[in-house]
Amino acid sequence: MITIRKMLGRPAAEMLLDPQSCLSWVTEINHAYQSLNRPGEDAQDIVDLKLSMIFWRSRLADALLKQAPPWVSRQQESTRSVLAALNTYLGAEQQKLAASLLDPGVFARLMAAQGTRTQGYPELDLQAGPGIDLDIVANRGSSTPFEKWRENDLFSRYAYEGEGVRYRGVTFRPGDVLLANVNLDGNGIYTALSEPRSFSSHSAFFAILDHGARRLPVVIETYEKGVRPVPLSVFLGPRFCSYVEVYRHSDYRPDHAARINQSAAGFINSVKGYNFDSEDQDPTYMSCGAVGRFMHQAAGLKPARTISKLTNPQIRKNLEKVGYSYFNYFGPVDFMRNDFFENVGLVDNNQLPQLLARELIDRDFQRNFAGGSLDPSKFPLMFKLNRWGIGQMRRQTLIGRLVAQIEGFTADNLPRGPDDLLAMILIAEKQVGSAIAKTRAVVEEILEDYQTLDMPAFTADERIRQAVQQYFNPSWMRSPDAVIQCPTDKL
């Protein structure tokens, strides 16, 4: 990891003198990061390195397109190769600059590698993927369910390779684990409390489903009402996710694909609801990580073992106040920490301010839970209303059936877990999400002062510390006396 940080710290001006030096720099760093011994490294250090890498990619793309060294427009295929190897999604301004610097055909190929179709280049459509988005948000129900979107022929149009597809710079195979930072502010509070430090807020899994004569590359994920498939292009899009890393079971072989796909298709109908107990062996209610473990097990692959725990005594005490006692907790990070999963690629949607704001608030949320005291008497009125409504739905009273009809729940698909936790978690997520949104604006402004991103220095920045303290101060948590953690602390 020290070697990677040294490579990231090389002066960009030297690396931009010619395309070969730049491409070699990018390739060397990519290889070092992909080959990192993740089970053997400190979990917080890995998260910090991930964020430093995202910063580096974004700044290098800016340097190539805004500063535009002479070779960028003269050697356009070399420029495209560097940007393709960098594999960071170009924002609107960066795309305009790229379009002005590159010939239309070269620009179209660059965009196709980022999942964007360019009119007039139909030969690139399979590489670009479906080219349409859907109104689907991670972990929430959608007005565009699987039964509806699967009828659209576009969602089968990808560049197939054997039993998988090549898309957004990654070759996906059935059973691949997607460790995702999804764009649902507040989504990370559930994973922020465990040890080792969570790498992502969500895990999901690649599969290919059959619909008639068509194949549908999808991401299988849990959501509030069970398990569903999301089109691969939608899940990886910049609206849905900010960052994704892809991991593959080291024992995977092509002949595992059929059983993985079959089990994924079965989960869509057999899983009734979400399960807050990630160790529950009942396959009819699943947490996000359980989906992958059951999927690999169905294919005859060794399932990932549990590494995460909720060990902090005060965190346990606070969780018990809302009825939560599942302290052997399988988290998304456990796929990365199991030594028989290997990194096979990443999708970076170039949203560093969003990711940093979430990381800062998640750290402070964990600090509060580990050192403060949860006070249920300070829960807002909505908690009592939610708690009452959940009880009515569980008992299937007349009012409960009406509420369930409005909310899209039944007595069977209500999440399995303590009702107090269910009643409070959406409220907490909303408050955390509000703090993240406010902090993001501060982060975006402060980032302009940084040439490289060193997370200990960034979190020690007094402006950052003040923003976090100001924007996240929930009334229902009596905070510890200490201010935001020192950057050298390990969570």
Image (cartoon, rainbow, N blue to C red):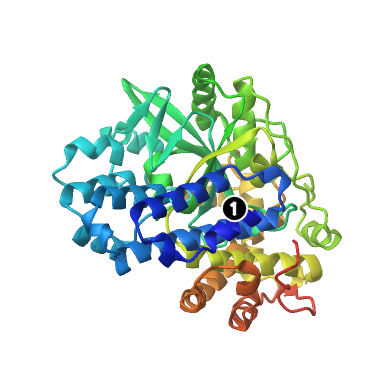
> Which of the 4 image quadrants contains residue 65?
bottom left
Query: Where residue 3 sits: x, y (%)?
Result: 62, 54
Query: Where residue 224 sits: x, y (%)?
Result: 55, 47
**Which residue is tagged 1?**
201
Q: Secondary structure at mark 1?
A: loop
In this rendering, the answer to whether 118 lies above or below 16 is above
Q: In this view of the protein, which residue sits in the foreground, 97 or 408?
A: 97
Q: In this view of the protein, which residue sits in the foreground, 14 or 120?
A: 14
Amino acid under disc 1:
Ser
> Which of the 4 image quadrants contains residue 351?
bottom left
Most extreme residue toward the left, as rendered?
120
Q: Image point 57% across, 24% down: which residue?
A: 252
In this rendering, the answer to whether 474 lies above or below 89 is below
Characterize the local packing of mark 1: few (<14), some (14-19) or many (20 or more) Cα atoms within 10 angstroms: many
Q: Is 233 left, or right, of 74 in this rendering?
A: right
In this rendering, the answer to whether 432 lies above or below 156 is below
Q: In this view of the protein, which residue sits in the foreground, 450 or 405?
A: 450
Query: Where residue 265 sits: x, y (%)?
Result: 49, 27
